[in-house]
Image (tube, helix red, strand yellow):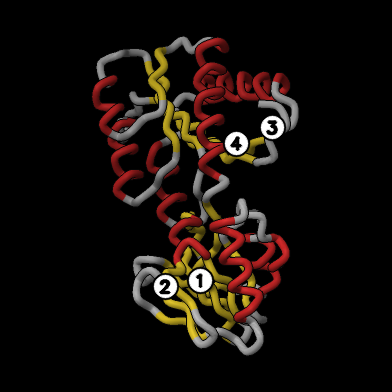
């Protein structure tokens, strides 16, 4: 796990403050053993407190460590509500009983640990979860849209275009997202993905979604057409060819 560059958001949800304290202490020990890793911890004394934060759109935890037996709402029920909201956070249940183990798989729980949880069992679960997230997270952008944080799959982004002081991101399902940022800022976020190229001053295109192109227009996989900016065709054609035939090294476009 050394050298990880991400700051992970971890939600601890348990109605007993002492249990949260114990888990937080183990997380601190885990961080000490894994230089370069960092995370921010949110403490929640009830499932509803966590659900309200997520529902408001200002909190998208990467990992939820949740007790199952809480008085107002069972952890399993809270997990079902998270999933119904489209929340894809990893969930690790910490519980005193194995009774709900099968239900945990029904909400796509990453792990099910029986209390008292040891450092060994928690660390093994964290290694697995963080390893999976490190690979997956590289393929998502976290953007604030209409005042709420959203996780956007990179492969769903077809192209982006400048619209005055806003940027319009077009997704494969037809969704259009207006972003309050500059084209330079958006280019910086997408520059780590080799399939994205800057075309002229107003467009960023995902080469994976280009079906055909000529000097006048670009045909996308959904049938949509994008006009080629003046003087951009030659460079775009070379980038397109290099991406599919030359090993994908296309950084000259940025």
Instruction: Give me the residue at 47% from left, 24% from top.
Output: 16
For the N terminus, which image quadrant? top right
- Closer to the observer: label 4 or label 2? 2
Which of the pair 130/28 is nearer the observer?
130
- Earlier along the polypeptide chain: callout 3 or callout 2? 3
Which of the pair 4/92 is nearer the observer?
4
What residue is pinned by disc 1?
159
State yes or no: discs 1 and 2 in contact (Cβ < 8 Å).
Answer: yes
- Closer to the observer: label 4 or label 3? 3
What residue is pinned by disc 4?
41
Q: CA distance from mark 1 to mark 2?
A: 9 Å
Instruction: Give me the residue at 41% from left, 44% from top.
Output: 88
- Earlier along the polypeptide chain: callout 3 or callout 1? 3
- Closer to the observer: label 1 or label 4? 1
177 vs 78: above or below: below
What residue is pinned by disc 2?
220
How many residues crowd around disc 3 within 10 Å: few (fewer than 14), some, or many (20 or more)? some
């Amino acid at each position: 796990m050394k050298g990880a560059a991400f700051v992970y958001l971890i939600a601890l949800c348990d109605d007993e403050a002492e249990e949260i304290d114990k888990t937080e202490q183990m997380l601190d020990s885990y961080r000490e053993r894994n230089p370069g890793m960092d995370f921010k911890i949110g403490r929640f004394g009830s499932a509803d407190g966590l659900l309200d934060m997520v529902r408001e759109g200002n909190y998208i935890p990467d990992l939820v460590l949740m007790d199952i037996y809480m008085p107002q709402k069972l952890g399993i029920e809270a997990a079902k509500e998270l999933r119904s909201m489209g929340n894809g956070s990893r969930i690790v249940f910490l519980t005193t009983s194995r009774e709900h183990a099968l239900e945990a798989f029904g909400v796509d729980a990453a792990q099910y640990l029986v209390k008292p949880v040891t450092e060994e069992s928690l660390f093994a679960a964290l290694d697995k979860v963080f390893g999976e997230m490190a690979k997956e997270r590289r393929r998502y952008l976290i953007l604030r849209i209409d005042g709420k944080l959203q996780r956007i799959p990179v492969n769903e982004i077809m192209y982006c275009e400048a619209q005055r002081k806003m940027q319009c991101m077009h997704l494969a399902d037809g969704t259009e997202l207006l972003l309050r940022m500059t084209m330079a800022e958006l280019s910086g976020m997408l520059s780590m993905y080799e399939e994205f190229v800057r075309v002229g001053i107003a467009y960023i295109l995902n080469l994976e979604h280009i079906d055909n192109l000529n000097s006048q227009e670009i045909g996308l996989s959904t049938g949509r057409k994008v006009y080629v900016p003046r003087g951009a065709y030659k460079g775009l054609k070379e980038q397109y060819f290099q991406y599919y035939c030359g090993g994908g090294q296309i950084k000259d476009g940025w």
